[in-house]
Image: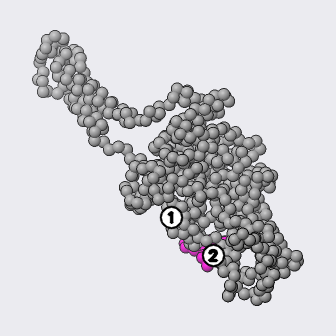
Amino acid sequence: MTRHHEHPDPERPASRPAWLVGPAFGLLAVWFVWFAPAPQIPASGSVQIGKAALGPTARATVKADPPITRVGAYEYRCSDCHRLFQNEAEKTVGRVQHTEIVLDHGLNDRCLYCHSQADRDRLVARDGAGLSYAQIPELCARCHGTTYRDWQRGTHGKTLGSWRSASPERRRLTCSECHDPHAPAFAPEAPLPGPHTARMGEPPAGHRPEGGGPPSAPFVGAGGARGSGEGGAGR
Amino acid sequence: MTIRIWEGKSAGAPGPCGAEPGFTRRGFLRGATGAVGGMAALAAALSPLRDLPDDAFPSLEEFLQKHYKEMTPAELADAMERVRAEVEGRYGVVPTVRDYPPIEGVRFAFALNLSRCIGCRKCVHACVEENNLSRSPEVQYIRVLEMPRGTMDLARGDHHYDRAEVPDGGHYYLPVQCHQCANPPCVKVCPVGATWQESDGIVVIDYDWCIGCRYCEAACPYWARRFNFAEPTIPDGGLNPDMGYLSNRPRRRGVVEKCHFCLHRTRRGEMPACLEVCPVGARKFGDVLDPQSEVSQILRTKRVLVLKEEVGTLPRFFYYFDERYPRDAGSPGPGEGGEAGP
């Protein structure tokens, strides 16, 4: 044994720290198993949207042709009352009946612009013959000609049932199935909740679910922070 | 870095033990420490496997399953039966899993009326319900951008808007989902052919063939693809049992998914879920090869645009305007409000 034990071997300069590799790996293993943080996958409170809010139904109900008002067990047509009350004055102020109707239709601010005075079960048309309540699009077309043209083409309005243009299940909703004819503009509504993704340039607190909790709070199931009040709607 | 146990001739003389020439205590300790440490590190690296659920490993049939396009009808039936059994085991619901091939002579297209959309996000959540998207982590195919009026700069859009009421007078709303491009970059970059375009224009994914590399997600200019970073969760009673093999059957962790125009509905003639729920009729869907379809009428008669036309993806998702900005005459129209667009 000629060389000194502590003397590094000039032929193997890299071999000296090699024995450190084992303990280093060991420490790393200990850290991985007991101390390493678990990977955080961003989770969010489960947002439950009730099927009622997502139904593919029309927005408004369509009146029968002619419209029928039910009072108790009795069914009335418009003409049943208006045979007695002719309402000559074309005013919307001072109504004592139909007070639930909010008339917000721009310049079209008189009942008799659309409702026929001669025949209370019909609507107004230029030829005087009137239109039935099944012909509402033709009534609206008197003013909204371009929109009516678009509706006929299918570029305005909503079509349900089938995308096939010849399908019998295809149904194009009429004007009053989406718009309230007395106030046709859609009222503003609350949007459904947005995504819980991180927002650029904002602290993470900005996208935490309602009810608090850290942004990366683990999934808490259907009755979570957000969905607890809305209940487990679904199919 | 070499760890020698057998020192060989370099050590020269016999070791202190004297038993074997070159076999030193120091060399043995070095080697043994390295080996034990290495094995411990390997075990630690594999330790997350202990936390895997029982059904994390694919069954033999799933492992040996072929690509969707290479399966015979009998093999596809077996695969769908396997999916059915899996869904029943995981969710306790017996689904109907069907394969919907594309309809001959049909090219689907979507159109969306920017003058009408009010940003209510009903489409987003109807899609989540219809397509069995993960609720947590949250996966949503549709992103509704709130855009300042007067610009088409998508970078100025915000999809986190949280207003008490929509629409806001100074903004318009731009929902974005998969555009089913006729020249799809996502399909080009897939290294395993797990995503492809079908003859009706819908780009589909074989969820069992996807390796989760996320190249397609990076290639998509519309941020349409979503990756399942964790096992998707669907609450009890929230599963839609009406499933298509290439569309809304439940996905697993580690695969990419995206909008498929509700192909399990549209390929049997129905409308997509996002269209059915839209309260203002802003969404239009149909066959562009049919001159009477609504999308054909829109392409003929309306001012139509696609997003990022310059990247050459040829989207099948069109945005259009009405001639006159609707509603709300008091608010600034496009081009008037806010800063001018590019």
Could you tell me which residue is drawn at 73 percent across and 66 percent down?
Answer: A62
Q: Residue furthest front?
A: A73
Q: How far across and how far down the image is residue A138, in percent?
A: 81, 70
Q: Dot 2: within a 10 Å radius of its alpha carbon, few (fewer than 14), some, or many (20 or more) residues?
A: few
User: Closer to the camera, B72 or A61?
Assistant: A61
The answer to which of marks 2 and 1 sits earlier in the sequence is 1
Q: Nearer the viewer, residue B105 or A136?
A: A136
Kindly identify the residue that appears in the image at 66 percent across and 54 percent down. Answer: B317
Q: Which chain contains the residue that carries disc 2? A: B
Q: Is any part of residue B148 visible from this angle?
A: no
Question: Considering depth in this image, is B56 or A205 the residue closer to the camera?
Answer: B56
The answer to whether mark 2 and mark 1 are in CB contact below 8 A is no
Magenta segment boundaries in residue numbering: B323-342
Secondary structure at badge 1 equals loop
A201 lies left or right of A138:
left
**Is residue B336 within the magenta segment?**
yes
Identify the residue at image location x=49%, y=44%.
Answer: B232
Image check: A207 left or right of A114?
left
Q: Amino acid at mark 2?
A: Asp
Q: Where residue B161 is drawn, which disc sits there?
A: 1
Q: Mark 1 is on which residue type?
A: Tyr
Write down the quadrant of residue A14 in the picture: top left
The residues bearing labels 2 and 1 have C-alpha atoms spaced at a distance of: 20 Å
